[in-house]
Image (cartoon, grey):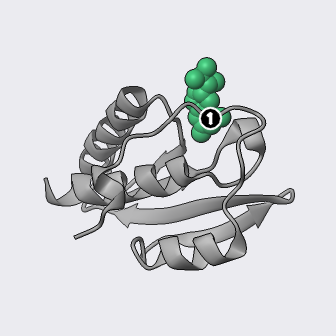
Amino acid sequence: MSELKQAKCEACRADAPKVSDEELAQLMHQIPDWTPVARDGILQLEREFKFKNFKLAWAFHQQVAQLAEDEGHHPALLLEWGKLTVTWWSHSIKGLHKNDFICAAKTDALLVS
Ligand SMILES: C[C@H](O)[C@H](O)[C@H]1CNC2=NC(N)=NC(=O)C2=N1
């Protein structure tokens, strides 16, 4: 069982540490369906979720939005027909914090709940 999905996001300040390369490698084992991507030099976690139609993708989009509000940590969401692309990163530190891995794991958990 993923320990990440049991954790709670903490307030992320501008001086909070980004995850190290070793931590990144370790944490990725718990969210193997996510891909680290760098955009404008900012490391992010991304996953595409596929659905049978727009309505199902839309419903999942709402679940992820509620998760974000519950955690106080917010992703970029791209809603398309049959697809939701979820991207997590920490704006305040322009990179990845443990919060992003917690939210990625909790996003995965929504699929099976
Ligand atoms: C004040 C508030 O807690 C902060 O602005 C939060 C809100 N949600 C956030 N979400 C993300 N992804 N990164 C942040 O740095 C962030 N900061």
Q: From this viewpoint, is residue 12 visible? A: yes
Residue at 56% in and 30% down: 11
Q: Nearer the viewer, residue 57 or 31?
A: 31
Q: In which quarter of the view is residue 44 placed?
A: bottom right
- How many marks overall? 1
29 shown above or below 56: below
Label 1's element? loop
Q: In which quarter of the view is residue 53 placed?
A: bottom left
Query: Residue 34: image x %, image y %?
Result: 49, 70
Packing grade of label 1 (10 A; few <14, some 14-19, many >=20) is: some
Q: Amino acid at mark 1?
A: Cys
**Dividing the image into 4 quarters, which one contains the N terminus?**
bottom left
For label 1, the residue is 12
Tell me: 85 left or right of 44.
left
Q: Residue furthest left?
A: 113
Q: Quadrant of ligand 1?
A: top right
Tell me: 113 left or right of 105.
left
74 shown above or below 42: above
Query: Residue 36: image x %, image y %?
Result: 63, 70
23 shown above or below 18: below
Query: Residue 105: image x %, image y %?
Result: 37, 59
Residue at 39% in and 73% down: 30
Cβ of mark 1 under 8 A from ligand 1: yes
Q: Nearer the viewer, residue 62 or 12?
A: 12
Q: Residue furthest right?
A: 40
